[in-house]
Amino acid sequence: MMTLLFNLVLAGYIAALLFAVINLLAKRQFLDWVVHALLAAANVIQLVYIIWRWVEAVGRPSAICSNRSFCSAWATVLVYW
């Protein structure tokens, strides 16, 4: 599952890059929304991937919240979700 998420993120970023280059070379700017949608989707998938890896490596965030830095890092991830 982790490999699938990583591959989806990579494909999303590469597709967004290709659409951005096509959009720059075109006379009309018609693919802006596609580029933004692909970047947003890739960011969300990458965030899920990072959270999933962290939970598998460390455990539940509430189990390690005795350290303030872990709590603030987890809260930052949740806020930007």
Image: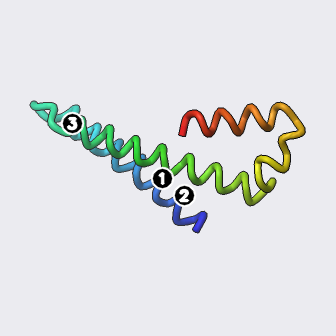
Image marks 1 and 3: residues in contact by CB distance under 8 Å: no
- Along the viewing direction, whichever of 29 and 43 lies nearer the viewer: 43
Q: Determine which residue is flagged by label 2.
A: 6
As drawn, 1 above or below 18: below
Whole-angstrom CA distance, mark 3 to mark 2, is: 26 Å
Q: Determine which residue is flagged by label 3.
A: 23
- Amino acid found under the numbered disc labelled 3: Asn
Residue drawn at x 16%, y 31% is 29
Whole-angstrom CA distance, mark 1 to mark 3, is: 21 Å
Residue drawn at x 49%, y 60% is 7
Residue located farthest toward the right when viewing the structure as drawn: 66
The residue tagged with tag 1: helix, strand or loop?
Answer: helix
The residue tagged with tag 2: helix, strand or loop?
Answer: helix
Quadrant in which the N terminus appears: bottom right
Which circle's residue, 3 or 2, is located before the other in the chain? 2
- Residue 62: x and y in percent read 79, 47
Residue drawn at x 46%, y 58% is 8
**Crowd around label 1: few <14 · some 14–19 · many ≥20 (10 Å):** many
As drawn, 17 above or below 53: above
- Residue 2: x and y in percent read 60, 63
Query: Which quadrant would residue 81 be assigned to in this image?
Result: top right
- Residue 30: x and y in percent read 15, 36
Image marks 2 and 1: residues in contact by CB distance under 8 Å: yes
Q: Judge from the rendering whether residue 1 lies leftward or rightward of residue 53; answer left or right.
A: left
Q: Judge from the rendering whether residue 36 lies leftward or rightward of residue 44; answer left or right.
A: left
Q: Which numbered marker is on residue 67?
A: none
The residue tagged with tag 3: helix, strand or loop?
Answer: helix
**Crowd around label 2: few <14 · some 14–19 · many ≥20 (10 Å):** some
Which circle's residue, 1 or 3, is located before the other in the chain? 1
- Amino acid found under the numbered disc labelled 2: Phe
Q: Which numbered marker is on residue 9?
A: 1
